[in-house]
Image (cartoon, rainbow, N blue to C red):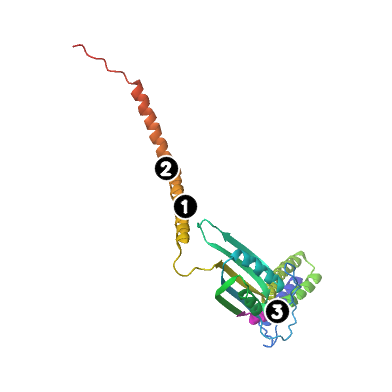
Amino acid sequence: MGRALLLVCLTLIATLGCSQSNELLPRGTSEPVTQGAPGTEPASPSNRLPSIGRLVVREAELLVWCDDYLGVAREIQEVVTKFGGYVVESDVVDLRDGSGPRQASLTVMVPADELEHFLTAVAEQPSVSRVASERVRSSDVTEETLDLAARRRTLERTEARLQALLERAQTIDEILRLEQELTRVRTEIEQIVERQRFLERRIQYAEVRLLLVPTPRLGEPGFLETFQEAWSASLFFLRVVIRGTLWAIVLTWWIWGTLLVMAALLLLWWRRRPSRRSLPA
């Protein structure tokens, strides 16, 4: 009888959870954004959503021309700190021998409401020649945020009912089934909470990716620049030839080894062969 009652309760909870997972909130509601300092874990997202309008994730990409891209990279990091943001990734390539590009790439996070001011500040840096390309993109995540909040409330109610059933369970079989279902529901809740935290951070902070490259020179290059480019190209070609030769030697070692062994055997046979005796006249 207890097992039948347990199955009826579990069926009732599952049916109720499915019916409540599709409930919709008023369109004018949204989830609060609580963001601490970078690197700290934000507070658990709330399920009660005040009316604050649409929720938008903003991103920007910049191609910046500058004479001293290393110095500009340091300046931009200072500007990011001034605006209350932080640097996510920094990558600098400084190959002066001409064997590769010379550039710096930065990925930074700045407060979303300061994005336009930050982009203007980057363009106004004294060492920046020109912002050659600028792309700003916005993604509306309001519907996803509301859906996550509704799913979380439904799962939390299901968790409370399962916990109440577990406290009244009498057999080991009932306890095991309820604990298994509780584990599944709590795992889904944790996944939703992590997604909510991620969206909160992305809503409050805009991601900006910057590529800093040397300002391209217009017009015909001078004699010295032409000589430097030719010299760098010749060194690069010489390295390619040397590396290719080494690769050929290493990859064909067995051929050279076989030829050396055959030459040694031929020389040994030549030295040990009997000398011809001169015939009498």
Instruction: Measure how far apart labels 1 and 2 are at the Cα level.
Output: 26 Å
Q: Dividing the image into 4 quarters, which one contains the C terminus?
A: top left
**Mark 3 residue element:** helix
**Mark 1 residue element:** helix
Labels 3, 2: front one: 2
| Residue 149 marker | 3
Q: Quadrant of residue 277?
A: top left
Amino acid tagged 1: Leu
| Residue 235 marker | 1
Is the stretch drawn in magenta largely helix, strand or loop? helix
Counting residues from the N terminus, which is met first, the one under dot 3 or under dot 2? 3
Q: Quadrant of residue 109?
A: bottom right
Counting residues from the N terminus, which is met first, the one under dot 3 or under dot 1? 3
Residue 258 visible from this viewpoint: yes
Residue 173 place in picture, x, y as percent: 74, 65
| Residue 252 marker | 2
Q: Is residue 161 magenta?
A: no
Labels 3, 1: front one: 1
Nearer-the-camera pick, 260 or 209: 209
How dense is the environment of label 3, judged by Cα within 10 Å: few (below 14), some, or many (20 and up)?
A: many
Q: Are marks 1 and 2 in contact (CB under 8 Å)?
A: no
Q: Which residues are magenta?
A: 139-148
Counting residues from the N terminus, which is met first, the one under dot 1 or under dot 2? 1
